[in-house]
Amino acid sequence: MKLFVCQACKNILHFENRSCGRCGHQLAFMPERQTLSAIEPVGEGFRTLADGGEGRFFCANAEHDACNWLLEAGETAGFCRACRHNGTIPNLSDAVQLAGWRELEVAKHRLFYSLIRWQLPVKTRTEDPQHGLIFNFLADDPAGQQKVLTGHDNGLITIALAEADEFERERRRLEMDEPYRTLLGHFRHEVGHYFWDVLVRDAGRLDDCRAVFGDDSLDYGEALKRHYDAGAPPDWQDNYVSAYATTHPWEDFAETWAHYLHIVDTLEMASEFGIEIDPPADQIGGLTARVTFDPYVAEDFDTIVHAWLPFTFAMNSVARAMGARDLYPFILTPPVIAKLAFIHELVREGGPDKQAVLAPEIEPQQDQEEVGAA
């Protein structure tokens, strides 16, 4: 993730900022330029100070304070590149559900920042009715008869609204004995399943992927039951990035995909701050790194991992000094690094329709009360 600069007053801005704290200018994200722009009203629309353009309009979800992205140039109504992938959203007449949905949208927009930077192929359900990427944000049945489970099915990603509650998310983390559980992690993991379909199965890379992650033709239901009955093998850290990754090759791929996105986006932010790791106590150079490159365009994965390992050692050490848990509580062994390198290769290649993410498309959005979803 980048830091941004207000074009009106040169103040430092962050991705989620809606207005500049120094000059008060309203801010909007321009996905085609991947930048946050100060804007000024002009007629019925806005002028973007980042490029001097006029006649720009906000995504329809700005009305609910759930999005600050601009529509494509020339569009006056509808949804932005991120929100056109929404299917069912929570009941917006419920203040608690509305607040939860806003939290989910923060994570979803960070996900789409990465997908757009890589120009990965992402189709809507309008473009591909069978496998287009669509998000359903669902609340549990008020009667308590049915709990929503986060998951993926042929491009349909269901996100449980309950996960937006920090206390509930922590309860689930402890119940499942997980070292790490975030909304952004859910989005990155579930979209990994979508890109397995797009970049592996549909792109003719099954054999290559199986050579790294194993045979995905194994019965998924049986594998899931075995995992929850017996847990991960005791030596799982030798070959997997997480215990859940041991469940099935599909989950191994999705977990590795999520970690690759964690790594790249975090390193970009470290680069934006000019972070350099050079501990005086390190006399052999194993913990030295200068994060001065753009990981989104790095050709060689070794460049990324050689910066990431010292950086995680440093930030985990700082977290411990404050009595907090490690920010990145995972071990990257050589087999795991090889899996991450495979993801890096897939992302660099992008797939047969890499530019599809740039094509404007409006996907209908309905709230949960309107469609009567559980």
Image (tube, rainbow, N blue to C red):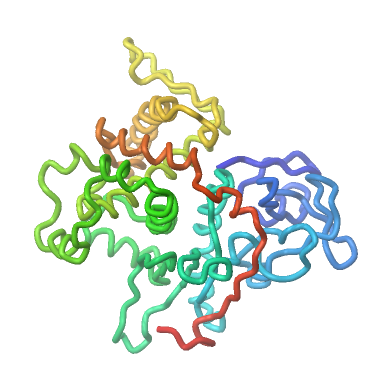
Where does the N terminus fall, quadrant-wise? top right
Where does the C terminus fall, quadrant-wise? bottom left
Q: Is residue 147 above or below residue 19?
A: below
> Can residue 68 be seen?
yes
Residue, x 80% and y 61% (percent of image)? 74
Residue, x 53% and y 74% (percent of image)? 98
Q: Tell whether 50 sits left or right of 249.
A: right
Residue, x 71% and y 61% (percent of image)? 71
Q: Is residue 39 above or below residue 154?
A: above
Q: Is residue 229 above or below residue 251?
A: below
Q: Position of residue 204 (x, y in %)?
A: 39, 48
Q: Residue furthest top?
A: 283
Viewer-proximal residue among 130 and 321: 130
Viewer-proximal residue among 179 and 234: 234
Q: Position of residue 86 (x, y in %)?
A: 54, 69
Instruction: Examine the image and state in which quarter residue 4 appears.
Output: top right
Q: Tell whether 205 sits left or right of 124.
A: left
Q: Position of residue 172 (x, y in %)?
A: 28, 64
Q: Tell whether 313 sits left or right of 237.
A: right
> Can residue 188 be seen?
no
